[in-house]
Amino acid sequence: MLRELQREIRLAVGCTEPAAIALAAAHATAALGDLPQEVEVILDPQTYRNALAVGLPYTSLKGPAMSAALGVFLPPQKELLIFADLDPHKARKAEELCCNGRVHTIYDPSFPDLYIEVRVKNDIHRARACIKYTHTNLVLIEGPRFNQNKFIFTSNQSLKFNLWENISFQDIFPLLDQLAPEDLGFLYQAARTNLAMAKCGLQKGSGMALGRKLLHMSRQALATCRYPDFNWLGVCLTAQALACAAVDARMSGEPLPVATLGGSGNQGITSLLPVWLLAKKLRVKQETMVKSLALSATVTLLVKNKLGSLSRICSSAFAGSWGIAAATLWLLGSDFPCIARTLCNLASSLSGIICDGAKPSCSLKVMVGVEIGLKTALLTLQGLAVSPSGLVAETVDRTLDNVASLARVGMAGVDQILLASATH
């Protein structure tokens, strides 16, 4: 479990779908051995959707074409940190390439999973690179820079979430007990990295400035409280403020890194920042804090695996809220049956929250996920329990299976509706 957590938490600059498109373009350009004159980008619908409206560093232009154009001028070695090498000069060159009609993008509905293929050419040569299943999983690269005509990396979907396929929610807790706190420092650092992005969002009022507005509400709540050192309303609002400010900044294209979780930066923000804040407010020991972060991340990843890598349900809000709720109850001393009840309660409230693409307003969904995660945990302590009906089954694992079936099968037609809406 430790190895899987370490693998699933990675630093990224910018939204991961544009970064992955830029990464594929960078690999294709490197294989070409020269700057291309034409660029063609082929994407799955979800990746296309998530790259349409999100901000990019150092440019006001958006979209998958601009993401690929940026990658043409960047080295691929830093993977999801590829935009860390970006500067205003490179961004201007990418804008010229994009605005001159040299970059063409399409999405192919036949690809159900993450798929990014970038083809580049000049007067003499052609090259291409393909990323599948996960944001950095390069499965094919070909071009004149290689002695062989085609160089294929050994890769398949089994590399992704191989632990999460085989465990239940109840299995998590014995595994958590086996983790040594001294091995979990990377989770604390991940939370602090995301806190830095939150501070950036609060300072600049990035995006919708939702985080800044929520922080103002939090300060008002604490000012009227008799016990300002610990007030659940204040904690909830502050947790929302931090998470939303980080998302505000990230979705606006601020060139700072965040710790992603399961390929999603917003998911890493939602899963880690509120739990870090709660543990800090409860004044628990460092070893307890990092274990609560591990629990939140693990629950979030288990849910994310069921929903799919690019789900039609907003996994930042939905999966993140499950991680927050589980970690909250664990910090308060609750047992697994209580945690299972609150997760079923969450399935009743947030299962219909749709992902309509990465963009600054993602912070609104994160706001809901953080609030519902924290409040549902506290309500469960007061006896709230949804009876099995609808999506809620007899067990939390079967409940999640039902939600996953809704997301993967029942909502299959959502992509075309959302893309038609976004592109008209």
Image: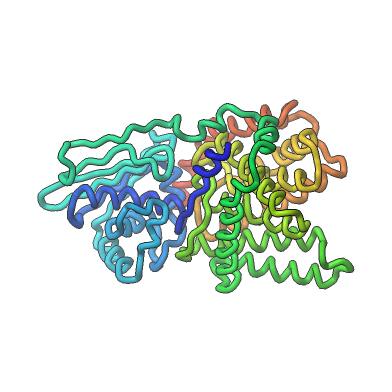
Q: Residue at x 55, y 73 (%)?
A: 204
Residue 188 falls in which quadrant of the image? bottom right
Q: Residue at x 30, y 71 (%)?
A: 89
Circle count: 0
Picture coordinates of residue 332 (x, y %)?
80, 47
Q: Which residue is drawn at 42% across and 62% down?
A: 56
Q: Is residue 128 rendered to the left or right of residue 270?
A: left
User: Does residue 333 appear in this view?
Assistant: yes
Position of 34 relative to 143 (above/below): below
Q: Is residue 322 rendered to the left or right of residue 157?
A: right
The residue lying toward the viewer, choosing from 110 and 342, is: 342
Which residue is the extreme one toward the left?
124
Residue 397 falls in which quadrant of the image? top right
Quadrant of the image containing the N terminus: top right
The residue lying toward the viewer, choosing from 63 and 57, is: 57
Picture coordinates of residue 321 (x, y %)?
67, 46
Position of 143 relative to 269 (above/below): above
User: Does residue 318 appear in this view?
Assistant: no
The residue lying toward the viewer, choosing from 153 and 55, is: 153
Q: Which residue is drawn at 54% across and 66% down?
A: 207
Q: Is residue 222 rendered to the left or right of residue 392?
A: right
Picture coordinates of residue 330 (x, y %)?
75, 44
Picture coordinates of residue 196 (x, y %)?
57, 65
Which residue is the extreme one toward the right?
226
